[in-house]
């Protein structure tokens, strides 16, 4: 399984029992604290393994670092943050490679395993399925505000909590719910990654704006014009496929398209499993919210309603 449906990771069947799942992700710093940056980057990279219903085993670090400009202590902290997240995930860091670079870059290539019959892709969503999202939106907007020194400490901390949280427990519930499709929400935003799921599955979708969880202060920051360029680009890219209620402000659409760093899982589960899945997520300490549904459609049209 490769890149044709824009899924989260590549899958290679070794035998009847085991397939390997392989992914790589890397970033320039999204935050000024090196240890937290390491944690976020690792949680984000591991997330693609979880989104496929797989278990992470092994990690290789990828590092670019300006050795002449920054103290090596900064790199040590970045790697420590990453290693601690990898350990929390029950995987191991087996090595890596570093080069000198003009700005810090950190990433992880992650190898996981899954039973070949239990791979969960973004291509299996069925009409009638409920859509459940496991983290609130808005980290892109808050990160932008933090860079401009326009976010208060509460907003900053809330975004950090979201970005450093592993999707491991969410994935366990997702697998147990018999989800028909799953993806994680990252740079393409909720709308972008949902669109990919719709296109891969040959269906349409409906999102109820009032149900979508958004971090506190995100709406007020966005109304001050603090919206990353990526949100505008995502919305522009998707416009052919988006249908929205004309009562809905463009600002709300930008929030739905906000590029997320280490966002939650978006899963499609049978409607009669939705309530139980949300409860099971809650028992795992994960906020899972039913935000919409999959509908029959020849085109991957995505309707946003109030
Ligand atoms: Co992904
Ligand atoms: Co990725
Ligand atoms: Co996937």
Image (cartoon, helix red, strand yellow):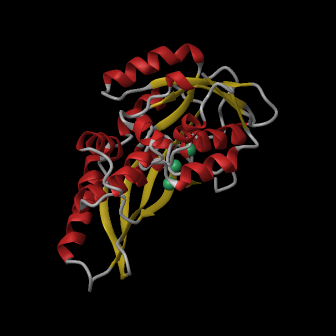
**Residue 245 falls in image quadrant:** top right
Question: What residue is rendered at 43% in x and 63% in y?
Answer: 26
Residue 31: x, y in percent? 31, 58
Residue 189: x, y in percent? 54, 44
Residue 25: x, y in percent? 46, 60
Image-based side of 132 in relation to 248, left or right:
left
Image-based side of 89 in relation to 130, left or right:
left
Image-based side of 219 in relation to 283, left or right:
right
User: Depth check: 302 or 15 in front?
Assistant: 302
264, above or below 148, in the image: above
Q: Please identify the residue farthest to the bottom as the structure is shown.
A: 68
User: Depth check: 251 or 209 in front?
Assistant: 251
Q: Please identify the residue farthest to the right as the structure is shown.
A: 298
Question: What residue is rendered at 59% in x and 37% in y?
Answer: 253
Q: Please identify the residue farthest to the front as the structure is shown.
A: 224
Residue 129 in view of the camera: yes
Numbered disc total: 0
Image-based side of 200 in relation to 254, left or right:
right
User: Depth check: 72 or 147 in front?
Assistant: 147
Residue 125: x, y in percent? 65, 31
Residue 21 in view of the camera: no
Question: What residue is rendered at 70% in x and 42% in y?
Answer: 200
Question: What residue is rendered at 80% in x and 36% in y?
Answer: 299
Q: Quadrant of the C terminus?
A: top right
């Amino acid at each position: 399984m490769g890149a044709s449906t824009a899924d989260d990771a590549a899958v290679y069947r070794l035998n009847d029992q085991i397939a390997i799942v392989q992914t790589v992700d890397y970033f320039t710093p999204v935050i000024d604290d090196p240890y937290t940056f390491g944690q976020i980057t690792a949680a984000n990279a591991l997330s693609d393994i979880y989104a496929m219903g797989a278990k992470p085993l092994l990690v290789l670090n990828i590092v670019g670092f300006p050795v002449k400009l920054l103290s090596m202590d900064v790199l040590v902290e970045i790697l420590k943050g990453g290693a601690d997240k990898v350990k929390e995930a029950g995987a191991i860091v087996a090595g890596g490679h570093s080069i000198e670079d003009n700005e810090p870059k950190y990433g992880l290539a992650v190898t996981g395993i899954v039973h070949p019959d239990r791979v969960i892709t973004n291509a299996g969503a069925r009409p009638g399925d409920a859509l459940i999202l496991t983290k609130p939106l808005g980290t892109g907007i808050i990160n932008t505000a933090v860079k401009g020194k326009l976010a208060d400490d509460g907003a900053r901390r809330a975004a950090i909590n979201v970005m450093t949280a592993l999707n491991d427990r969410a994935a366990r519930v997702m697998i147990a719910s018999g989800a028909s499709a799953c993806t994680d929400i990252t740079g393409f935003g909720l709308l972008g990654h949902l669109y990919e799921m719709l296109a891969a599955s040959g269906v349409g979708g409906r999102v109820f704006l009032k149900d979508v969880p958004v971090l506190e202060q995100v709406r007020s920051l966005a109304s001050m014009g603090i919206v990353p360029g990526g949100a505008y680009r995502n919305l522009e890219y998707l416009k052919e496929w988006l249908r929205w209620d004309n009562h809905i402000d463009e600002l709300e659409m930008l929030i739905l398209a906000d590029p997320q760093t280490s966002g939650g899982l978006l899963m499609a589960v049978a409607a009669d499993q939705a309530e139980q899945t949300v409860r099971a997520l809650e028992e795992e300490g994960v906020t899972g919210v039913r935000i919409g549904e999959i509908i029959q459609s020849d085109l991957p049209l995505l309707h946003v309603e109030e």
